[in-house]
Image (spheres, grey):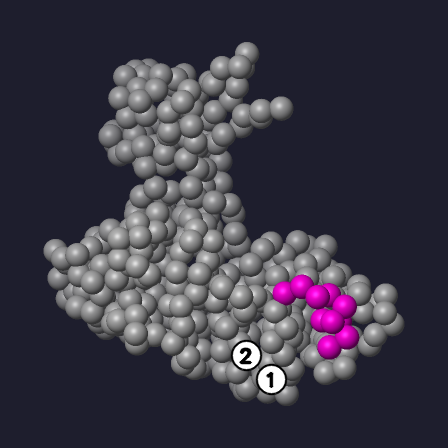
Amino acid sequence: MGEFFDKLETRSDDERSSDLSKAIPLQINNAKENSKAFSKILADVDPSEINSVEDLTKLPVLRKSELVRLQAQDPPLGGLISGSVQDLNQIFQSPGPIYEPGMVKKDWWRSARALNAAGIGKGDIVQNCFSYHFTPAGMLSEQGILAVGATVFPAGTGQTELQARAASEIGVTAYIGVPDFLQIILEKGDELGLDLSKIKKALVGGGPLFPKTRQSYKERGIMCLQNYGTADLGNVAYETVADAPMVVDEGVIVEIVTPGTGDPVAEGEIGEVLVTSLNSDYPLIRFATGDLSAIAPGKSECGRTNIRIVGWRGRADQTTKIKGMFVRPEQVADLVGRSSEIKKARVNVTRSDNNDIMTVLLEIEGDMNKDYNSMVKEILKLKGDVELVTPGSLPNDGKVIDDQRTFD
């Protein structure tokens, strides 16, 4: 195994753009021709006109709520796969419930690049502590481990003492799983007097990796990196350098958009992560993950050339109920779109004397004395306090609805 998993990781920007100009229309056509759901979603789309990342903005966003609805109408997978259910090797279930397809193909979920970046490869014995039960996390990781030439110990979750003893007796050299569980295994090993010193590498995901946790691994001689993925999409991005932004995987296209819309935000601005998968078996197009992140400037020092995203910054679904009425990010986006003078908006929700208080902050480029109260009431369906602020006043945290209420 070389420094890079494949040549795709080090393409020039021009090479990647050229390759995507061919791959994107092919995937759009595949989805439209072979998926029952996308044949309707993309009915009015000419695939030949969608040949760049920028062109994807012409397409609708597929949200998880829509995925659940489609699966309820056409179980179990909503007609989103390209082919029939009988062609699949596996079907998984995640909370929701949401069902995901699986195929027994080399690195079908694309976790190998992340593992390779973490230094895991031939000669390693990897303790796979992601769940093999219901969700695809265990199988997703296993395929990547095999693809980089390492050996899998399919440990799954729980049973800490057995995990520690097995790691010692097998001679495990690497761990993959949620960030905190490795610490629990190591501490159990200490308690039992086991030698777990062969564990030198870790790739973690499925939860936040706190600096103290990473440092504790470093003190034990374990290099720990993290990756980001979902059960629907597989691997999306991965660290190649500790504490640096994550490099986007070559098998997906990532956009960062204003929550509740499909409109891209500026580089560095926090927004919702949309992913288009280039997997021909499950062609999710502009799938809204519900996660917040941002595009990081520049390229990775490791030599990989794809765009990078900062880590997880929260959830995009900020829908909340105010005075008995739901207020959604889509409505806030509609408010911004109604006037060219409104550059950004944020709804703050507080509580006073058992009453909900809604304050709408509008970044205005223009007349700071204009009255926006009727527009706010029309779009949000509620009356609230409207405050006009200058551009750049609102924080760059991806929030368009900030519910600050406490109900103690």
Identify the mark at residue 151; answer none if there is no mark: 1
> Which residue is found at the position 55% from the left and 86% from the top?
149
Residue 169 at what x, y percent from top left? 76, 82
**Span colored in magenta:** 157-166
Q: Nearer the viewer, residue 176 or 4?
A: 176
Q: Residue furthest top?
A: 353
**Based on the displayed image, in which of its 4 quarters is residue 6 positioned?**
bottom left
> Which residue is found at the position 33% from the left and 71% from the top?
279
Q: Nearer the viewer, residue 368 or 42?
A: 42
**Based on the displayed image, in which of its 4 quarters is residue 324 positioned?**
top left
Identify the mark at residue 145; answer none if there is no mark: 2
Q: Element under label 1?
A: strand
Tell me how far mark 2 sits from mark 1, CA to CA: 7 Å
- The answer to if 240 sits in the magenta stretch is no
Amino acid type shown at disc 2: Ile
> Which residue is found at the position 46% from the left and 18% from the top?
357
